[in-house]
Amino acid sequence: MRSNQGLRAGGMPKTPEDRSEPEQMKTSAIILLFVGLMIAMFMFSLNQTVLATALPTIVGELDGVDQMLWVSTAFMLASTIMMPIYGKVGDLFGRKPLFMFAICCFLLGSVFALIANDMSMLIFGRVLQGIGGGGMMILSQSIIASVVPARERGKYMGIMGSAFAVSSVAGPLIGGWLTEGPGWRWAFAINFPLGIIALIAAAIFLKVPKRAPGPRPKIDVIGMALISIVTSCIVLVSAWGGHDYEWGSWQINGLIIVGVLAIIGFILVELKVSEPVIPMYLFKNRDFLLCTVAGLFIGVGMFGVLSYMPTYLQMVHGIDATVAGLMMVPMMGTMLISSTLIGFVVSRTGKYKKYPLMGILIMAASLVLLSQLKADSAAWETMGCLALLGLGLGLSMQTLVLVVQNAFPVAMVGTATASNNYFRQVGATLGMAFIGSVFTQRLLDNIKDGMGELAKANPSQPLPKVSSTGLTPQIVAEMPEPLHTLIITSYNDALVPLFLWVAPLAVLGFVFLCFLPNTPLAQTLKADPAKRELVRVGADSSASLTDVSQSHTDSSDSLAEKARLKESTHDGTDHTQRSWDGSSGPAH
């Protein structure tokens, strides 16, 4: 019997719920629940992209091109900070009321964004949307993980991944259509009917088991505050460095110092508190560590492209917002198909490792190809590159989440899922902030330098004044030559080369995933998958072999899997998958 020392060191608390077997829901009940979760997931993912095509018009009307990156970054920053908080609090106190609160907070942010008359109010509304959106995403994934076994969960996670695929194109399409029609503010108004439907679905269909009575857990308030500081410093350094403030300035250096001190303080706090918001023992699990690092790299590339590609298409190719959204359809199609198909394949075979490996390599190739685009490149070239990116994302994103969830017991699935998604969202926020900051600065410099060269070339011909912070697609389209060519060339040269800077991160992600173990997917809902794993390698070897062989139809795969399971209890690499009290040895 182990002492409580592991608990004080950051181990998982032994609550009454941990010792009980979760009750598996009927398929019909799961489907009704799944509908409500999908609506919430769609709302969150839609609002990551719905402003992409509307952004040029929004910042033009509100005269805020210099603040353009914060419209998206504020949403991502707030949602990223809240993800581990929602995950931990949901594990401790239940997910249903928290889920409904997140939806309400999201709708409140939509109100402020809807009535915004300047960039400050719009960004504030996006912050509130992010605070609610982080919970909508994490709790949706955590809830489905608490009622569906990992082996069957692949198809549900695949469909959830398709929500991102649909929204990645539906968002720009809807945003473009609304911008050209009733106005961009309607992009926020459409959240209300969706939000009401999600609230009703949660209230009626969300039947999650009640936690057994016991001592009231302590919330890691200090850890939550520190992780907020860390995340904010990371994003602010990325967004301000070299743009608002010079690299090496006291402002940037100060943020770096505060961020490093906050990281150190956060680690020390998490090692001591009884209910850490991101338990440090998660990083002892190889599945979690490798998937989290790869997910962070995926987030940088994905959102770096999604956030600014529609703007690029409108400005450079001179198309309207709706057509720019339609040009993103190939990405949605390949991501939708690949994510859904791979989810069903993983559920049927239980094998998953090769799919994220292929996906992240395809993603790297697509980023390299995108970096070669020119201002006069044909539309099919851009659409082909985006289709390739969608294929890579569909093969990798949700599969990595499934692997992380499979590595932990149901009582911890919210914390593990939230922690994994937190780092992926950090990558997404870094991608948006870094690419947005560098893109904006390069664009302003390109326009300034280009105007200077035109003035020198034609000293007798005065050039019309151009407000670099008030450009819209309509204004650019109506510009005379050579100003028109100058602007579209400036946009192309400012954004496209940045994709090549991001591509090596995807290659690094591939290297990390090469070391990902083939952990078997659980076929039942167990409070602790350790019990299932240790039974297979226990004294009764014949029963163990029978259990393993039932999970794998191919005899050679079965033999390899049995050997891996026996070996894994002694190799010192994956023990956290079987022991949850903070120690590194196998459970007894």
Image: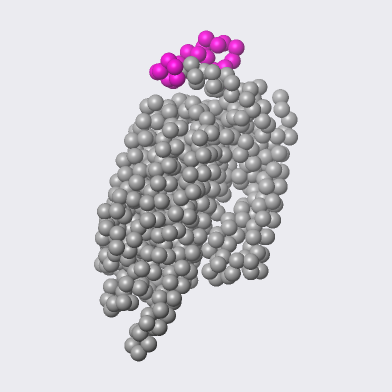
- Please name the residue shown 54% across and 21% down the image: 564
- Who is closer to the viewer here, 547 or 182? 547
- Who is closer to the viewer here, 102 or 335? 335
Q: Can residue 500 be seen in this view?
A: yes
**Looking at the figure, which quarter contains the C terminus?**
top right
Residue at the extreme front of the image, as rendered: 457
Residue 27, compared with residue 360, is above or below; it is above
Give the percent coordinates (x, y) of residue 152: 41, 30
Q: Is the magenta stretch mostly helix, strand or loop?
A: helix
Q: In which quarter of the image is residue 466?
A: bottom left
- Please name the residue shown 57% across and 19% down the image: 566
- Who is closer to the viewer here, 374 or 223? 374
Q: Can residue 90 be seen in this view?
A: no
Give the side of residue 489 with respect to residue 508, left or right.
Answer: left
- Please name the residue shown 32% across and 63% down the image: 375
**Looking at the figure, which quarter contains the N terminus?**
top right
- Total number of numbered labels? 0
Residue 18, compared with residue 65, is above or below; it is above
Residue 461, compared with residue 213, is above or below; it is below
Give the percent coordinates (x, y) of residue 271: 69, 43
Does 281 appear in magenta? no
Give the percent coordinates (x, y) of residue 25: 42, 31
- Please name the residue shown 48% across and 44% down the image: 507
Give the percent coordinates (x, y) of residue 365: 40, 46
Image: magenta residue range = 534-557
